[in-house]
Image (tube, grey):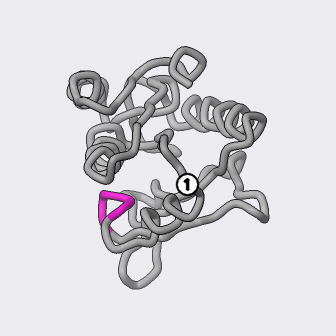
Amino acid sequence: MQMPLGPWRGAQVAVACMNLRETVLADGGAVIYVRYLRVDGSDGGPQGGAQIAAILHPISDHLVIDKYAIDAFDNTKLHAYLRCLNAGTVILAGIATSHAVIATALTAVRHHYKVHVDPLTVTGVDSETHATALHRLRHTDGVTVAPLSVAI
């Protein structure tokens, strides 16, 4: 959470993600956390930056999936869990837009999910790569980049 990020700081994204989580839960949706780890089980991000923010601590009935690569679908059970939930749409949030968010979004589309990215709930390692990733996502069939209230 202390890493330099852009355009939003980690704390801003965490608060936006907390609000998103509450909206999804109020709508009866499921929340799945994805945690990036190294093969030895340690935090996979630079400077311990891949941990789940304290204000987003998973509630007991929320699923936490550990991933060891950038894409949340890569060698995880995410797709299987989403199928069990009969999910048609995946809402992505977190850090970093130009890495995990875009990789996971593109795989979700290949798995035939609709993907939604609220631009206030994601940030990049810098503003330029963040903007480039959002631009690419906006031009990807099956992906909506907009505040949550307008798409779902």
Residue 93 visible to the viewer: no
Q: Residue at x 58, y 29 (%)?
A: 12
Q: Indicate the position of residue 118 as horizontal and vertical percent values.
A: 48, 26
Q: Is residue 66 left or right of residue 6?
A: right
- The secondary structure type at the circle numbered 1 is loop
Count of all numbered marks drawn on residues in the image = 1
Please determine whether, in this image, residue 148 is positioned above or below residue 92.
above
Q: Indicate the position of residue 132 as horizontal and vertical percent values.
A: 21, 26
Residue furthest out toward the top: 150
State the predominant SS element of the stretch in magenta: loop
Say which of 140 and 37 sits in front: 140
Q: Residue at x 26, y 50 (%)?
A: 110
Q: Residue at x 61, y 29 (%)?
A: 16
Kindly indicate the quadrant of the structure image that contains residue 3: top left
Say which of 23 and 96 sits in front: 23
Please determine whether, in this image, residue 63 is positioned above or below residue 7.
below
Kindly indicate the quadrant of the structure image that contains residue 148: top right
Q: Which segment did they paint magenta?
A: 69-73
Question: Which image quarter is the C terminus in?
Answer: top right
Name the residue that disc number 1 marks.
86
Residue furthest out toward the bottom: 40
Q: Examine the structure image and report whether residue 71 is included in the region drawn in magenta.
A: yes
Residue 135 visible to the viewer: yes
Q: Residue at x 46, y 57 (%)?
A: 50
Circle 1: residue type = Asn
Q: Indicate the position of residue 75 as horizontal and vertical percent values.
A: 33, 74
